[in-house]
DNA sequence: CACGTTACGGTTGAG
DNA sequence: CTCTCAACCGTAACG
């Protein structure tokens, strides 16, 4: 797996593409680079030139810009994990009832009833084969089965709406930790809100949240391992730093180091670019950043040139985080349209929300 | 040449 | 704890 190709010397590992750029197979490009791609495009630089300057394959530049145009987010999609189950206890309960009331009912009929009765919607209704499996495994002889329903219901699911959207599972995820704690009101803060408030992007949002939480929550930090890591990808970048903290030692350091830098031609950029680094272990990491910091910005910061970077650039990689953070979204694009089922969705909608606030890109 | 697409080899993480 | 497997990734190459 990690065949490390030491690029230069330090730990950087990763591979070098035809353009001389460093990348880690299977992992998203650092947010700083993703951000840079978008920034350059907004400055009017052609994709082919961006590809050459940043040493990122044109296919990747194309993909990132397309996604940005579509969702307003520079962040990569959610990697790994499973989609939320559609066969929630509530659904199973209904299936059982249909079967009990009509033992000869066909799976497809059950499916239609789930839709007709509003138990499911077209996005989360179980497939006929899933229903057959449920009948076979969980409701074989109706009687015993389970206990579940009692306790849980599948509340959320109803919300279908987003579920699908976020494969990631945020809904839950976040809520648990961060949310709850945070919200004083008791009302759970949804990620969305948060994000909004802070103006982050969605997915990220989450992560941010996590990150943040981490922040505040020492415990979290403590468990380095635990860290919030999950946030995944984007996080890596974003999270900026949190260096110190835990530092988880190895990890961060590396990150910090960051420097991996890939050679960047253009001086200007380079600075911050370098910032990003892959974390060795990658992922995310560990560092969680100071969330607060960057966020704050007022906004417009994201202007291409200097701002963010500038300070960002400096030392540790983290800044990178800021940067993107700030711009994670584009001004916004259309909103309403897409959300549902489309593939990328996850963040999309979030983004959408976000956009509002985000900056306007125009310079 | 520019760039949208996609096969490929890879990683992740909920279940 | 380990295994599955779908979702995502970026590169390379095709058109």
Image (cartoon, coloured by chain):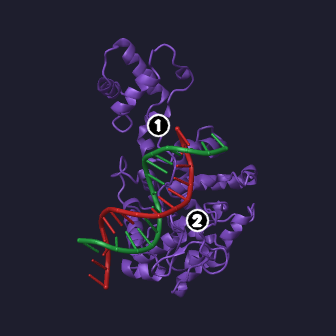
Chain colours: A purple, B red, C green
Q: Tell me the number on the disc at residue A237.
A: 2
Q: Position of residue A155 (x, y in %)?
A: 50, 31
Q: Tell me the number on the disc at residue A73.
A: none
Quadrant placement of the C terminus of chain A: bottom left
State the residue in front, A39 or A25. Answer: A25
Badge 1 marks a residue whose secondary structure is loop
State the residue in front, A122 or A209. Answer: A122
State the residue in front, A257 or A216. Answer: A257
Is residue A215 toward the left or the right of residue A45 in the image? right
Is residue A256 toward the left or the right of residue A142 in the image? right
Q: Position of residue A85 (x, y in %)?
A: 47, 37
Badge 2 marks a residue whose secondary structure is helix
Question: Residue A11 occupies which quadrant of the picture?
Answer: bottom right
**Is A38 rendered above or below residue A229?**
below
Question: How far is the residue under mark 2 from the one under mark 1?
Answer: 30 Å
Question: Residue A284 occupies which quadrant of the picture?
Answer: bottom right
**Is A149 rendered above or below residue A85?**
above
Residues at discs 2 and 1 both on one chain: yes
The 10 Å Cα crowd at callout 2, few under 14, some 14 to 19, many 20 or more, is many
Which residue does the image show at 63% across and 65% down from the upper left?
Answer: A240
**Chain containing mark 1:** A
Which residue does the image show at 37% across and 61% down from the upper left?
Answer: A70
Residue at which label 1 appears? A85
Q: Earlier in the sequence, mark 2 or mark 1?
A: 1
Q: Position of residue A208 (x, y in %)?
A: 59, 56
Quadrant placement of the N terminus of chain A: bottom right
Q: Position of residue A151 (x, y in %)?
A: 57, 23
Is residue A264 toward the left or the right of residue C11 in the image? right
Question: Residue A183 occupies which quadrant of the picture?
Answer: top right
**Chain containing mark 2:** A
């Amino acid at each position: 797996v990690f065949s490390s190709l030491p690029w230069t010397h330090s730990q950087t590992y990763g591979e070098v593409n035809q353009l001389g750029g460093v990348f880690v197979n299977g992992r998203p490009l650092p947010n700083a680079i993703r951000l840079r791609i978008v920034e350059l495009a907004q400055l009017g630089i052609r994709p082919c030139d961006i590809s050459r300057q940043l040493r990122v394959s044109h296919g990747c530049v194309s993909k990132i810009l397309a996604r940005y145009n579509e969702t307003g987010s520079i962040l990569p999609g959610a990697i790994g994990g499973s989609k939320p189950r559609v066969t929630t206890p509530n659904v199973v309960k209904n299936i059982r009832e249909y079967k009990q009331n009509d033992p000869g009912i066909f799976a497809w009929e059950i499916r239609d009833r789930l839709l007709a009765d509003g138990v499911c919607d077209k996005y989360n209704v179980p497939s006929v084969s899933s229903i057959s499996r449920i009948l076979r495994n969980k409701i074989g002889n109706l009687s015993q089965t389970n206990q579940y329903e009692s306790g849980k219901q599948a509340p959320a699911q109803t919300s279908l709406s987003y579920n699908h959207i976020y494969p990631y599972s945020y809904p839950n995820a976040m809520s648990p930790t961060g949310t709850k704690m945070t919200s004083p009101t008791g009302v759970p803060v949804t990620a969305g809100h948060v994000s909004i408030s802070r103006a982050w992007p969605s997915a990220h949002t989450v992560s941010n949240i996590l990150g943040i939480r981490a922040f505040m929550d020492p415990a979290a930090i403590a468990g380095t391992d635990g860290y919030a890591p999950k946030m995944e990808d984007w996080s890596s970048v974003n999270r900026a730093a949190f260096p110190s903290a835990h530092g988880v030692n190895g990890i961060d350091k590396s990150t910090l180091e960051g420097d991996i830098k890939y050679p960047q031609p253009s001086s200007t950029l380079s600075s911050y670019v370098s910032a990003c680094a892959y974390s060795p272990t990658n992922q995310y990491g560990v560092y969680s950043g100071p969330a607060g910091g960057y966020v704050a910005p007022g906004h417009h910061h994201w202007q291409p040139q200097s701002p963010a970077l500038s300070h960002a650039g400096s030392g540790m990689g983290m800044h990178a985080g800021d940067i993107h953070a700030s711009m994670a979204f584009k001004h916004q694009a259309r909103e309403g349209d897409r959300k549902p089922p489309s593939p990328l969705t996850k963040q999309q909608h979030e983004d959408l929300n976000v956009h509002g606030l985000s900056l306007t890109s125009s310079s």
